[in-house]
Amino acid sequence: MMREVPLVHPGEILLKDWLEPMGITQYALAKAIQVPRRRINEIVQGHRAITADTATRLAVFFGVDAEGWMALQAHYDTQMVRERLSDVLPRIPRYDQAAHA
């Protein structure tokens, strides 16, 4: 099943909604939150997930909740898995309590 709206990696959100509008470079962010520059680069390129560690650091830096970053990543990951398992999921039966009562 084709997705109508393109799925956006949380790294693209970090880049387009936070870093670019605020004029913050990847290097400056990495330095401020004390992580390797490569970590931020891989996240904004969509090659790396935002972990709880990174989410917490971003939350402190931007003054937001870490859970928001984690929710973005969880949504992205779940949608990717649904696509990858699209041929398997329809064959998994739904548990019906009434049938087993």
Image: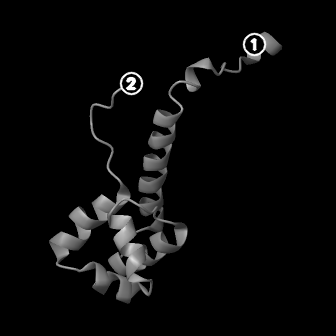
Label 2, residues with CA under 10 Å away: few <14, some 14-19, many ≥20 = few
Q: Is residue 56 left or right of residue 24?
A: right
Residue at numbered disc 2: 1
In the image, taking residue 21 as reference, residue 26 lies left or right, namely right
Few, some or many residues within 10 Å of mark 1 (<14, 14–19, 20+): few
Which of the 4 image quadrants contains residue 61? bottom left
Kindly state the secondary structure of the residue where label 2 is placed: loop
Q: Is residue 44 above or below residue 85?
A: below
Q: Quadrant of the N terminus?
A: top left
Q: Amino acid at mark 2?
A: Met
Which amino acid type corresponds to the residue marked 1 in the rendered image?
A: Ala
Q: Which mark is residue 98?
A: 1
Marked residue nearer the N-terminal end (2 or 1): 2
Q: Locate residue 53, reporting x and y percent.
A: 53, 73
Q: Residue at x 38, y 66 (%)?
A: 43
> Which residue: 32% across, 49% down?
8
Residue sticking out furthest to the right: 101
Q: Camera-side residue: 68 or 41?
A: 41
Callouts 2 and 1 close, C-beta under 8 Å:
no
Nearest the viewer among 96 and 40 is: 40
Q: Position of residue 75 (x, y in %)?
A: 45, 47
Farthest residue, direction top: 99
